[in-house]
Structure formats: structure tokens, C-alpha cells
Amino acid sequence: MIRILPVGFFLCSFLTLFNPAEAQVVPSIPQADTSMTGPDRDAAEAIKKPDQFGKNIADSIQTFAIRTGSVSYYSVCPGSRIVVPFTPQGPFNDDNLFSVQLVDVRGNAVSISEGIKKGPITAIIPADKRGGHLYRLRVVSTSPAVVGSEVSLRLLPTPTAKLESADGSTSSRIMPGQDAQLRVVFTGSGPWSFQLSDSTMITETVTNPYYLSTKLEKITTYKLLGVANACGSGTVDGSVIVNVDANPEPRLALKDPDKGYRVCTNTPFQVNFSATGAYKAGNNFLVQISDSKGAFKNITSGDTTAPIMARVPPGTAMGDYTLRIISTSPRLVSDSTRITIAAPTQTVLRRDSVKLKEGGSADLSLQFQGGGPWFVLLSDGTYENNILTSPYNIKVSPYNTTNYTITSAGGLCGVGTFSGNAYVSVDVPPSDIAIGNPSQTLICSGGEISLPFTTTGRFYAANKFIVQVSDSTGRYVDMPTTGKESPLKAKITPPTMRDTVATYNLRIVATAPGVASGAREIQIVAPDMAVGEVSGRGAITPGNSTRIRLKFKNGLPPWSFTLSDGSSVSGTFLNPYLISVSPKTTTDFTISSLKNACGTGTSSGSARVVVDN
């Protein structure tokens, strides 16, 4: 019989291995439904077309939809029953039936429930569906025919189990009374239950792989008879032959000799091997490597069991060597494998002095010695790894003049030693602003202009660009400015106006660093300065007309005005302006509204026209 090693915990319930296990729903932790990345797929939109009376049919019909409820909190086995909730929208017909469909990754759908009038619906997952795959569920209706939204559902796979020896082989050799180690490797969802050919039965284990040991007096072949989990019985594979020999011939072999070793000098590494059979009292196992002439030397002291921790002596030259295991009593030699010995990395940054223009890049040269591949971290944070060639050029793009050194560098043997520096200077042009032509060269006070510009050199993150206008003394005053890049928007409001129209200078200044552009001239018109005067007196008979005179002062044309009788003129450049009027009764004409480019003006005076009946 088999002695069981500690394996975690066992549950009291027991799965029958040789009868088909009834599939059941296993709740798991709720998770997001990753299949729902767009609008519900159940949107049944009304067709937009007119009926016989010319009305839109969509205005007189209902929109039908079915929202399938989430089942992502289930982990389901093939053949299991599952309850699917759903929410219908719209009045369905009396003969309508709802049912559940299962959709695979190719979009093929199969019905898995009977039709019912209302939910929730109990559905059965087909037993022939493969576990471990992602499916989708949806609810559909018959009258009207509506396809509901889809939700994801993952089916649990049935289990598999493979029996092998503890080292992965299919056989082992022991002496009477020694332990033979076996292990069982599972796939599928745990917990698992299994039975061996010697009637050993393990139930509800969650340990994977599962290790067990056996003491035998004669040769025995172990097989798995069955395995099961929550989804029922699965498939088994593998067998192990345990050979029992009272006086077995000793055998010595490396584990995985084809893989070889890649190690660093003076760094411990583990050598695994298999030693079977009877060894004499006082036997020791030693690790040996060959020197450059092919002669082997010990690199460990004696040890009695595998694995052995070995260390390559300091001063051993880099290169490829041969490694093997020997026993002392009896004297046996294992098969051999290749061992590559690497030294700690030495990295040198070549001394250099480079001059760059702003925005340029430079190649710095690195020299590596020791086991690669290598990595390097420079003092400005530039990092590269998996470097396979030496010397190696690393590209840097400094923003400011920088003296580069190595912060860290190494290779196969970890961080090594490093040295060297390289000086890279960056030629930064002086900061300057070049102002462009403003969007207007004649503007009313209080108006907004657009002012383009270009820059050279550097401006700090906290910098602000400000438009300025010169005052009567030539001193520049800040204008309300918006924008951080060209063009700037500025509201032009000079502090004083020397005349109705005056010429001022515009410029752009920066705050960090403090620089100013050249100046551009602009003419500014005083605001609200247009004045309209009405004058004249006349007499007419009914049905005739006469002209009254309007004169504009200040402000710039064009002028737009409205008389008190509602007559209006837009955008005239005439000054004075004569306008014909034909009143039916005696009327005093005034200006009720006056505007020009600078805003609303004022008026004075009146003109009387007498109508003589």
C-alpha cells in the first residue's frame, strides 16, 4: 500500500470514479462580462416607412427588446442545468414564447431550453460541448421574433491526470525499504479525485501536482484507474514501473544534461543528478569541471545526496568547460554536459566631448567585458538592455549640456563594475520673438486683433506671451491677451487717446525669459465718438417730398443710422448726407440710432417738415 504525503486538506464528500459523475453548477467569483463591449445586440429598430395615410409607421408601433441577465458568476460544466434571467421590453403577442440559445465562438447558435411565456428560463448545457471554451447565451422570442443581448459563459473542462515518477520519468529503482516517489499532474478545475491500480484512492484534493510515496518489496507497475472533478470523469495517462532490487547495480546520471549550465565565477549554482543502486558506506558525490587541457578537477567537497551546490573558483577563465558528477565508493562517472563560465561585467563609457545643436542627438560608445547580454543605465536615465555587441553605441538626446556617467551596468553575472564619462554640450540659441502682421491695422479701441509670431530659443513652462500697446509717453502697457501659441488674441484698449484716430505701437513680450519682439504700428480709433447732427426746415404739400441734411462728426465711416420715422441707411461714406422724406403730416425728424465701426454714437438737432394741407 501507499503512504500518503501531506497534501493540504481533504473534504468529506467522495466522487464515484467509475460511474459518470452528474454535472453540476459550481459558483465562482463574479467577474466582468468581457463580451459586452457595444450596445445590446437585441435592439429591434422600427422600419422607417410611411403607411397608406402618409404617416410614419415607426410613430405608431412599439420597439421590442430583450436584455439577457448576467450569468458571469457561474462556472458551468457541460450537461449542467442553468437558470437564465432576462428582461423583455415592449408588449409581446399572446402566442409568444421565450427560449435560451447557446452561441459558440463561430456564431453558431443552438436552442438549449423549451419555450416559455415568462422568465427566468431553465436551460441545459449540451453534454457534447467542450469545456474550457467561452460561449455566449442569449434569450430569443417567437412573436415577434427578437434576438436578445448576449452574455458570456465559460464552460469548465473535464479533468485529465498523468502519473509519473517525481522526477518526471516513467520508472524508478529502489532498494527494499526505500521510498519511491510518484506524482499525479492534473488539468481542468479542481478539486480532483483519483484512484491508483493498487486501490489507493484520493478524494477532493486541490494540490497540483499531487505527490505520494510508496515502500515496496517487489517490482510493481502503477497506473491510474480514473480521475474526476465537478464536471465528471476524465481521462488518465501514464504509468510508472518501480524496480525493487536488494543489491542493485549503482548508476549515476546527470539530470537534463542537454540543457547545460551557464554560470558566473564565484557564484553558487545547483547540479542535479540521479544516483540509484547500492553504494558503499562512506561514499561521496563530487562535481568536477575540466580545465583548458581537458583534465578534471573537483569544485565541491563531498556530498551524499542530490542536488549539490557548486561554485566555480575565483580566477577561472571565461569559456566553455565540461561538467560531470563522480562517486567515490564505488568510483563511478556520470555523463557530462557543457558549462559556460562567465566573469562579472566591466563596462567603460569612452571619454568623449560632443557639441550638439538644440534638438540634436549623439552616440556615446560603451565597451563591455564579461558575460553578456549586457545592460546599462546612464546618469540621465537612458537605459538599454539585451546588448549583444561590444563596443556598443547608445544614442542620447540631451536637453541641456550634460556630463554623462554610468549609474549601473552589468550582464549575466548581475551588476558589475563601470567607469568613464562623456561630455555633451548643447548650443541653445538666445530666446527671441519675431512678430508678424496683425490681422487689422485700423481698429477701434476695445476691438480684438489676431497677432501671429514665431520664436527661437527656449521659453520656460511658466512663460506667458502678452501683447502690449504703447501709451502717449511711449511706455508699453499690457493688453488683455489670450493664447499660448501663435496667433495671440488681444483686446486693444489704449490707456489714453490723443485724437479720434491715433497711431500706436504693438509688440509681444514673454515673461520667462523676459524678452520682447519688435514693434508694429496700428491705428486706433477712439470709441463711441461718432456724432450725427440733423438740421433743416421745409414745407411741402401732401404727396411731395423734401430733403433733410445729416452731418457726421468724429468717428470713421461707414455710418449707419435710423431716423425717428423708421427710415434707415446702412454703411454710407457720404458726409454730409441728404435724405428725402415724405411725411403725411408735419414732422420733426431726429436720429434715433447711429452706429459705425467703433460702436454706437450720439446725435443732436432736428429737422421740421411742415405739410400744408
Image (tube, rainbow, N blue to C red):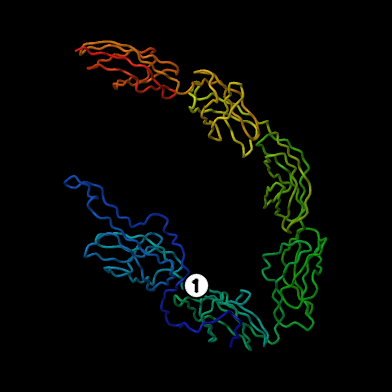
Q: Residue at x 39, y 59 (%)?
A: 106
- Mark 1: which secondary structure? loop
Mark 1, Cα crowd under 10 Å, few <14 / some 14-19 / many 20+, is some
Q: Quadrant of residue 116?
A: bottom left
Residue 228, above or below 352: below
Residue in front for this viewpoint, 203 or 159: 203
229, above or below 49, in the image:
below
Q: Which residue extends farthest left?
A: 52
For residue 324, what is the image quadrant? bottom right
Q: Residue at x 64, y 89 (%)?
A: 217
Judge by depth and name the residue closer to the eye, 101 or 608: 608
Residue 4 or residue 139, whichever sits in front: 139
Q: Quadrant of the C terminus?
A: top left
Q: Quadrant of the N terminus?
A: bottom right
In the image, residue 80 lies at what x, y percent? 39, 73
> Which kind of residue does numbered mark 1 sit on?
Ser
**Image side of residue 500 versus residue 266, left or right:** left
Q: Please determine whether, in this image, residue 296 is positioned above or below residue 539.
A: below
Q: Whole-percent x and y of residue 417?
A: 78, 54
Residue for badge 1 = 189
Residue 310, x across and y down, in percent: 76, 69
Place residue 560 in its image quadrant: top left
Q: Left or right of 290: which side holds 459?
A: left
- Residue 124 horizontal side relative to residue 519, left or right: left
Write the residue at 80% across / 82% down. Answer: 282
User: Looking at the picture, how far across and down is residue 392, in whole percent?
Assistant: 71, 46
For the point 40% across and 65% down, the residue is 70
